[in-house]
Amino acid sequence: MSLRPTLLPIARRVGPPDARAVGIVANEFFDPALGRMGGFGWAARTSAECLAGARRIARPPVLLAGRRGLGARRPDRHESGIPLVKHDDDRKRYARRLDRAEVGLFLTVDYRPNYLPVLEARDLPTIVWIRDPRSPADVERIATLELPSRLEPPQGVDAIDCRSLGAHVNRTETAGGSIAFASPAPALAAPSMRSTYDVEPDGIHFLPNPVSSAVAGVRRAERPRVAFLGRLDPIKRPWVFVELARRFPRIEFVVLGRAHFEGPGSWHPGRLPSNVTVLGHVDGESKRSLLGSAWMIVNTSIHESLPISFLEALHCGTPIVSCQDPEGVTSRFGRYVGRWGGSGLDALDAFGDAIESLLDDDGLRLRLGAEGCEWARANHTPERFLEAFTALTALLDG
């Protein structure tokens, strides 16, 4: 299905952007009380906070959970104070909830099939914020993932069929509705749109990540420190980071993040080397301070799009070592070690060489960090997000 043009004519006016609430649709919201703490949740929470604090946006945003995306006992308000509206299978009652919240525009955090009942409850302009489109090649690579024990299949790697978005776009087009596609990495997203969503837009707008800059005055740790930032789930392969720590006993390895999955097929740290510290979930100024003190971050995931962890590290002037190179970010601002499937343990030598190269060359490490910081602050900030979002809503209003 080909969507032409990318921005469709509007069926009805719902008021100017500053007079309506933005409904941010997701299944996670980066609140420990609301479950999963991943990149989609970060995008939902941070974009909501950015819009809530913007002077040009009169009505505060609302978080909208996908159908059965949150349990009934979850709180009705995010820890930041932003209202959270859960889905209701009674379509009329749910539509009234959206009306009471004065939702006039949807911003979806990527797309999942259980977003459809939310999007179909009201005929509203929609921005689909593409975060992690997975091509067939990506799906095949992820399918090679295995835990170091090889005793059970890893959790959290099953492919999700998101092609129902294409049918929704067709219905929206027929009804004269309005949909725009955006991404923090448009060039990365474009080749996978057809295979992932059954949509082939003429263009994808740039909607950056609203990443805050590092706190002033943060200093690098005197002792070399390497950081891991992400969920401690199989797809991130945190065990590779632990094995790297065994190879560098005089370097401090710090793990920021927590596991989402439990039981067989999950991973939890155990019998760690003495130079590894697991801090769990860390957020806000504490996270930025820790990233700013690190000499580099190491990303060991079998798959990534454009990780928030990369941008947060670069805002702190901290270079990247990774086996993922989205939009050439790792190659430009760190050390790319090549793609590695399976458990990732075969990549230990490549990772070790990259870490040593940055440890041994202070000038190179500092230059890469400074260049990465300049790039991140020029492209992925709350200010850039608001500028791009305002421009998108203006286009939707035609």
Image (cartoon, grey):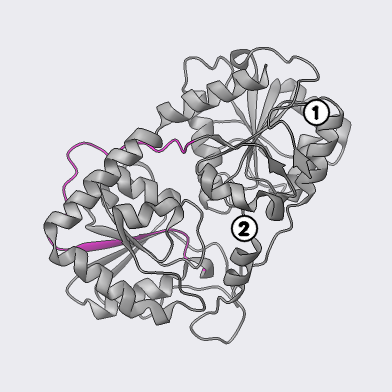
Q: Earlier in the sequence, mark 2 or mark 1?
A: 1
Q: Give, as a single range, the part of the protein colored magenta.
A: 208-233
Point out residue 263 in the picture as x, y percentages from the top left corner.
59, 74
Q: Assess disc 1: are there few (<14), some (14-19) or many (≥20) residues with their C-alpha within 10 Å of its C-alpha.
A: some
Point out residue 214 in the picture as x, y percentages from the top left corner.
28, 40
Residue 259 sits above or below residue 292 on the image: below
Count of picture labels: 2
Is 4 left or right of 33, judged from the image as shown?
Answer: right
Residue 48 sits above or below residue 183 on the image: above
Q: Which mark is residue 122?
A: 1
Is 12 left or right of 190, judged from the image as shown?
Answer: right
Residue 120 sits above or below residue 338 on the image: above
Give 93 or 45, whichever is nearer the viewer. 45
Give 12 or 45, whichever is nearer the viewer. 12
> Quadrant location of the N terminus?
top right
Residue identified by numbered label 2: 134
Identify the residue shown where x is 71% and y is 50%. 197
Q: What separation in Å lies between label 2 and label 1 (alpha carbons)?
A: 28 Å
Q: Amino acid at mark 2?
A: Arg
